[in-house]
Image (cartoon, rainbow, N blue to C red):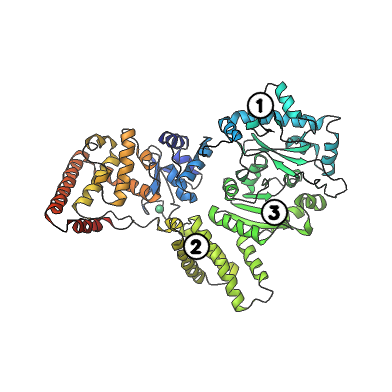
């Protein structure tokens, strides 16, 4: 498990205001000093979900979910603690270095590089490439290709299309003249190699600039111009990749980036739909024809990372495949992404084996818009393909097999996705419609399968058990332990009265012991640390939820000094009793374990 230093966790928390982050997922209304909304973790009919801007904590008073901003993202997006930290670090532009020690020189160089510096180097390179393309002599052949593809001058300008020359280290030499350090060019992925043997990464290629949502250039994609002129589509000569992208840098990761996002975001918001194509020119051509909610993946299939980006702008995503690549496999992946990312995905394909660019040029805007409009919901797409595979007249056994396969895929995805009951309900209704079966039947069938998948994997089991109450034990000792935790969470300065008397080892209720460990560790390092900081010392979302409950109960009860003193006495007393029993009875070990078992219960 990667460990995160507490300073880094605090930095990430502070850079991600909980009201802003949660506000991106649900609508919050101000109520007194808190913000309230419908809880996304249970079927909420009245706003039970509270967000406290001062404490930077959320709390649902109906289902008990609660914690800091990291816990919210863990629960909401079904992520592990480290994944959620990474997500929030990205959101705030904080760089986390959790890569294992590497001897790869290039990786080290990239880690050291400042993303802003890389963006500046890229901006310079984009201008340089654009000037090459515009150059009367040097850019002549490339401009011919651009004209053949019918990309307009305006598109070339708006999309900052450029040219990497075939000449030896053209970019590297130009950059050195401009006093741009080699190290930075390496970190940006514009050159490759090491030491004195550096060379240009992109050679004789038409260059597409890849920007983030703010328009900052994060990478490049290059299409080879060393094409075979006799081939109708100008396919690459042997040994030369048709397309290459910048490598992963401090600024760029292709599975989490989309081409054209900066151009498409506004139209995605107003149409509530994002269209995803597979090629740079497909994307640019769509915009050239006035369909401007289109983005492109960068040589990867559509991932949950892409879905999360698009979900910020649109409720629905249409994946537009070239007809020859549209397949069940792509739909299967998309189905998983749709379920785990809670986004509607439609699937559309271009007829007659054309790519979207060709289709637009041949048919125009309206038929293209119609393709998108007629996209088939991914559930339905998968279902019809499955049925078609079983032959045109599926037998009952055949149909059962199709149903089995389909429901298994969905049950697995549901478990992975950590869905709320409402979301599950929507899926069941959707399936009932698509499969022409009774919703209740599907619901039962999914539940049966989901629990089977869950037993197979203990990790995903966490999802549905998230709301089962944790056992806090009973009896004098258990109550005393709970009281101490309540006081420390609600009034951390009382830690001074506790720290020399007891330790987390005095807590034998597992859930309370986990909290005690977090509390003792955090308050030991940071006296009077806030609840949100203590929450971030546990990774388990249920434990964090319990912490917010106990803090709330503790604060309601007040009377901290007296309660703490009484609880410490009670705990000491029960421990003395236990020791006494142990020293006078021969079967003491058995007795002690019996008592423990009574107190513990299962987590
Ligand atoms: Zn709730």
Q: Which residue is drawn at the image coordinates 65% and 24% (left, top)?
A: 181
- Viewer-nearest residue: 64 or 594: 594
Residue matched to label 2: 425
- Viewer-nearest residue: 214 or 192: 192
Query: Please, what secondary structure does the residue beneath circle 2 have?
Result: helix
Q: Quadrant of the C terminus?
A: bottom left
Q: Residues within 10 Å of mark 3 (few under 14, many from 20)?
A: many
Q: Is residue 95 above or below residue 437?
A: above
Q: Which residue is drawn at the image coordinates 46% and 59% (left, top)?
A: 457
Residue matched to label 3: 320
Q: Quadrant of residue 225?
A: top right
Q: Nearer the viewer, mark 2 or mark 3?
A: 3
Asked whether, in this view, residue 226 is left or right of residue 98, the answer is: right
Q: Answer whether labels 1 and 2 touch (C-beta < 8 Å).
A: no
Q: Earlier in the sequence, mark 1 or mark 2?
A: 1
Q: Quadrant of residue 174?
A: top right
Residue matched to label 1: 182
Q: Earlier in the sequence, mark 1 or mark 3?
A: 1
Give percent across and percent down for residue 274: 64, 49
Q: Residue furthest toward the bottom?
A: 396
């Amino acid at each position: 498990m990667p460990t995160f230093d507490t300073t880094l966790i605090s930095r990430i928390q502070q850079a991600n205001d909980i009201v802003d982050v949660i506000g991106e997922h649900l609508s919050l209304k101000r109520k007194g000093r808190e913000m309230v909304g419908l809880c996304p973790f249970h079927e909420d009919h009245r706003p039970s979900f509270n967000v406290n801007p001062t404490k930077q904590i959320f709390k649902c008073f109906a289902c008990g979910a609660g914690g800091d901003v990291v816990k919210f993202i863990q629960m909401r997006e079904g992520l592990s603690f480290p994944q959620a930290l990474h997500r929030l670090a990205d959101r705030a532009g904080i760089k986390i270095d959790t890569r294992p020690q590497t001897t790869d020189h290039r990786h080290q160089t990239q880690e050291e590089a400042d993303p802003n510096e890389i963006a500046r180097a890229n901006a310079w390179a984009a201008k340089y490439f654009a000037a090459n393309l515009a150059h009367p002599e040097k850019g002549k052949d490339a401009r011919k290709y651009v004209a053949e593809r019918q990309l307009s001058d305006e598109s070339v300008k708006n999309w900052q299309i450029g040219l990497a020359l075939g000449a030896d280290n053209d970019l590297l030499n130009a950059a050195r003249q401009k006093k741009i350090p080699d190290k930075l060019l390496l970190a940006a992925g514009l050159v490759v190699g090491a030491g004195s043997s550096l060379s240009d990464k992109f050679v004789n290629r038409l260059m597409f600039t890849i920007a983030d949502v703010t328009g900052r250039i994060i990478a490049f994609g290059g299409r080879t111009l060393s094409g075979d002129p006799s081939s109708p589509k100008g396919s690459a000569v042997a040994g030369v990749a048709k397309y290459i992208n910048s490598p992963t840098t401090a600024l760029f990761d292709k599975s989490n980036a989309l081409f054209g996002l900066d151009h498409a975001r506004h139209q995605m918001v107003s149409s509530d739909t994002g269209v995803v194509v597979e090629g740079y020119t497909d994307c640019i051509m769509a915009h050239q024809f006035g369909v401007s909610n289109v983005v492109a993946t960068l040589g990867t299939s559509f991932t949950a990372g892409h879905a999360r980006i698009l979900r910020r702008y649109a409720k629905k995503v249409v994946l537009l495949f070239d007809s020859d690549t549209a397949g069940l496999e792509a739909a299967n992946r998309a189905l998983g992404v749709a379920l785990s990312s809670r986004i509607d995905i439609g699937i559309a394909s271009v007829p007659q084996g054309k790519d979207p660019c060709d289709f637009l040029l041949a048919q125009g805007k309206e038929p293209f818009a119609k393709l998108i409009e007629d996209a088939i919901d991914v559930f339905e797409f998968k279902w019809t393909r499955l049925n078609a595979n079983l032959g045109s007249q599926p037998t009952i056994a055949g149909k059962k097999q199709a149903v089995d396969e389909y429901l298994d895929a969905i049950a697995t995805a549901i478990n992975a996705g950590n869905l709320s009951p409402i979301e599950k309900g929507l899926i069941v209704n959707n399936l009932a419609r698509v499969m022409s079966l009774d919703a209740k039947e599907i619901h039962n069938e999914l539940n049966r399968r989901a629990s089977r998948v869950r037993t197979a994997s203990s990790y995903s089991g966490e999802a549905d058990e998230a709301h089962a109450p944790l056992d806090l034990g009973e009896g004098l000792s258990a109550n005393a332990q709970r009281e101490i935790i309540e006081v420390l969470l609600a009034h951390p300065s009382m830690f001074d009265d506790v720290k020399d008397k007891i330790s987390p080892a005095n807590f034998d209720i597992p859930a309370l012991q986990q909290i005690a460990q977090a509390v003792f560790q955090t308050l030991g390092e940071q006296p009077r640390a806030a609840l949100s900081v203590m929450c971030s010392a546990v990774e388990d979302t249920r434990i964090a939820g319990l912490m917010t409950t106990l803090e709330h109960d503790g604060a309601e009860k007040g009377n901290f000094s007296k309660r703490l003193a009484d609880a410490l006495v009670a705990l000491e007393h029960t421990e003395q009793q236990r020791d006494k029993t142990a020293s006078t009875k021969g079967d003491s070990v058995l007795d002690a374990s019996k008592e423990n078992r009574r107190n513990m219960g299962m987590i």
